[in-house]
Image (cartoon, grey):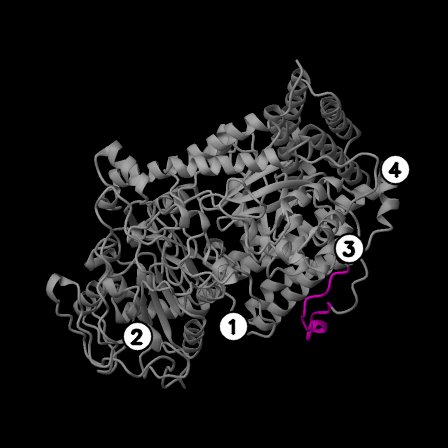
Amino acid sequence: MKNRKEYQKKANSQIKKAGFFILSFNFLILNSFSILPVTAATEEPVLSVVHSPENANQWTGITDRLQTIGVKYCVIPLNDVKSGADWGDRRVLFLPNVETLTPTQAIALEEWMSKGGRLIASGPLGSLSSAGVRQLLRSLLGGYWGFSLSDTEQIKPIKTNTPEWANQTELFGKIRGGVVIPNDMGAESAAVWNSKDNPAAVVTTERSTFFGWRWGTDTASAAALDNAWLKAALNHYLTAPPPSSRMKKVTGGSSNCSTTVAVAPREQGGRGVEMQRGSSSPPSSPPSPPPKTATAPIPRALTIVKPPNSEAIDQLEQAVRLDVTPNSNQPIDNNEAIALQQELENLIGRVESANLAVSADVANESVGISEKKQSARHLHTYTPQPVNVQPTQLASTKLGGLVRSKDQALAQVRIIANNLPQLIAQKNYALARQQWLVAKTILWQQFPVDRRLAQPEIRAVWLDRGTIVRAGSKAGLAQIFDRLAQTGINTVFFETVNAGYTIYPSQVAKEQNPLIHGWNPLEDAVKLAHERDMELHAWVWTFAAGNQRHNEIINASPNYPGPVLAAHPDWANYDNLGNMIPVGQTKPFFDPANPEVRQYLLKLYEEIVTRYDVDGLQLDYIRYPFQDPSAGRTYGYGKAARAQFQQLTGIDPIDISPSQPDLWQKWTTFRTEQVDSFVAKVSEQLRQKRPNLILSVAVFPLPQQERIQKIQQNWETWARRGDVDLIVPMTYALDTSRFQRLAQPWIASKQLGATLLVPGIRLLSLPTIGAFDQLQLVRDLPVSGYALFAAENFNNDLQKLFISTQGRVQSKTSEPIPHRQPFQTAAIRYTALQREWKFVFQNDPLERSAQTISDFNNQAEVLRSALNQLAASPSASKLLVAKASLTRFQSQFRVLMSQEIKSNSYQVKVWENRLVTIERLLRYGERRVQLHP
């Protein structure tokens, strides 16, 4: 930590010398530390403003503010944002509240900015775009729109290092907006919200500024505040020196735009905007609200616009990677330097942790371990492929040569890590990036992927409908289960209800999936799983009733809502504009408040768990579709919900809005309680039929309040009440550090009661060794296992890797599964911990007194004995002894490990996490296991 602080101080000093003095001097002379009217060196427009269908309804407010500022600007239709066109000499582009961009448009922005263009954006820019577009926009903007705040908040300056241009009193006031999440590299907060943890309200880079609210809308911000921020950002970019003295023109966009200040005369009703010459046609009026009656809104005749992506999870997956280009000599700022250093340190910790587990296991001389080693010799092994990095110039740092051992590899990586600050200070950015990639490659190659290292854990995979259909028969399905069993998977989430269809012939559901012919996959899957000592959990779509993507596959009409809603249109849910499917999404939803919907789903789930010997049921889409109340996109206006809420409050919910906080909170609570009460009812009713049934939920890892506002999913309540056994957050990310940031708040949560946490890992686009890296992180955290999405991405390389590291070992007894045998799992995992401690004490050169080692071993042995007795014969009294022994041991652990903390704090934290896992297993077992007195 001390070294890191010294390094950060040095990097800050370099950055100040390089640019901050010049920037401050410019502002001192040109701005006198106050906001000036926007001016330009010529009479030509200095700003291009993008008009799109999404900001059309806000255009009057936008243009009114632009006129007040007095800046000359051009209006560019979004469709004209494309490569190769000409924006003249205008250096700044403004995208107010544009949520959908195509890949072509995003690439055009990147090209334009690479030539010196500067970008200002506001609102949830690109949030409805494809994953690739969102990733590129995050790079261009230095961050992304995280989530909307539920209330109006004060915007204020950051406490330290506030950019000079953003340090004006006129910039701070109350705004209704959202949190902007800065990238790890190259971005800084220019202002923050006066709420918990002071999240960013404005993020800025050398090339862009991102406002965390919908600029130009009176419901978000006062005009004076909007104007102050835009003027400040424009002055910042217009007074700064151009990025290249040779740059005469910034191209990319449209030459067909206004060159005078726009005039916006209002049409009757104050809605229309008369566009200036050269711009696109006037925007259409916003659609009318749904009928203000207690009946369901009349569905609109939908004009199907193919959505930018198919799943809501895609829109929330924050795949922020450390994109390090080997030969790029772009400057590395302080934030990026620290991020690069920290990621190497964490990766070193994961590599050492994995190798320690293997070394301790190999060193153990028990008969059981010897048998396991003998069996492991017959397993296929996986050899990781190196990352495609050309280590040119490596010899210049005397790091060349073949890595012959783990110790040599780690030594080389530490040299690289120590040299990074010096290379960055010397502005040798390309070599710094190249060395970082070489270090990462070396570390990935040091993972012990040729040996089994997994302890008892939940190893789950989602077996998706597409893979089931392609299997085509019991024989085809058997091949899939054989592969999964070989790789050590012990739990399968089998897609049983999808898009309103069951995968099996049902007496309750309207129709079996038409892609299945003369076959009952669920019946076969249960048998195949149990024959291989695997659990099979029926994975069901709960409130999502159909899917436009599925309609394409079966050649149904895009508007087809699925077989259930087609038969029962009164069961449908609607958004505030009367749409069954929200704009930009692909799925219609049931109304959770409708008692007939609830009765139907309960009857369907009861059929599944009583007709088939499934081991569990997983609820997916146990929520409302995504909404953004601050943007006027809300959902939940089904016939039953409106009638019930009106009966409770006397008000039709279609008549209220987020600008009425008390009423809006009641409406949000009402919808959230519909989901909460349904989960409780499912738990109660199904466990009466099947007491040992495991109930799990696939959920979003958003902060709780944001999640409740956006999708009405409050899974902390389900966990605390004991309604569910497993919480499976969809922590999907393309890099390990991002995965950890998504999972960490819930891993550390105290609100989960006796429920086990099983983070989800998305395999799509994840390199094989990258998947293993995420698995190693999971094993270093206090969780009970993982779930892989999905079987269709389970390739041969992954299969070889998993066979080597977690594949089945021939044994007389099956390996326990945490949600079935929590006490046995706890005892085995603790024994593995003791092996690691023994190995470290015997091989670590740290000097320890005989008394210290004796005290540690005595306390550790007391806990081992208590856990083993509980596992052998569970009883209430033995559980009490085990919990007390664990608490006592945890309280003394840091004292006993005081020397290790100094030399390897990462590993000590891993051990503490594994003790927490044992604690959670005991708590879960207390609730789920029949205990004798």
| Residue in front for this viewpoint, 544 or 324 | 544
Q: Earlier in the sequence, mark 4 or mark 3?
A: 4
Q: Disc 4 versus disc 3: distance between alpha carbons? A: 24 Å
Quadrant the C terminus occupies: top right
Type of amino acid under label 2: Pro
Q: Element type at marker 3?
A: helix
Q: Earlier in the sequence, mark 3 or mark 1?
A: 1
Residue bearing mark 2 = 77
In space, the residues marked 3 and 1 are separated at their CA atoms by: 33 Å
**C-alpha separation, residue under disc 1 versus residue under disc 4:** 53 Å
Give the magenta-colored segment's residue range: 383-399
The residue type indicated by label 3 comes to Asp
The question of residue 385 being in magenta is answered with: yes
Q: Is residue 918 magenta?
A: no
Q: Is residue 368 left or right of residue 815?
A: right
> Which residue carries the number 3 mark?
407
Q: Which mark is residue 365?
A: 4
Q: Is residue 625 visible?
A: no
Between marks 2 and 1 in the image, the one whose residue lies nearer the viewer: 2
* Residue 354 image point, x, y percent: 72, 48
Please report the residue visible at 78 percent of the width from the left and 69 percent of the height from the top. 401
For the residues labelled 2 and 1, say whether their Cβ atoms are less than 8 Å apart. Answer: no
Give whichever of discs 2 and 1 has the lower sequence position.
2
Q: Nearer the viewer, mark 2 or mark 3?
A: 2
Name the residue rendered at 77%, 60% in the picture.
383
How packed mark 1 is, by other alpha carbons closer than 10 Å (few <14, some 14-19, many 20 or more), is few
Residue beneath disc 1: 330
Q: Secondary structure at mark 4?
A: loop
> Is 249 in front, or is 131?
131
Q: Quadrant of residue 537?
A: top right
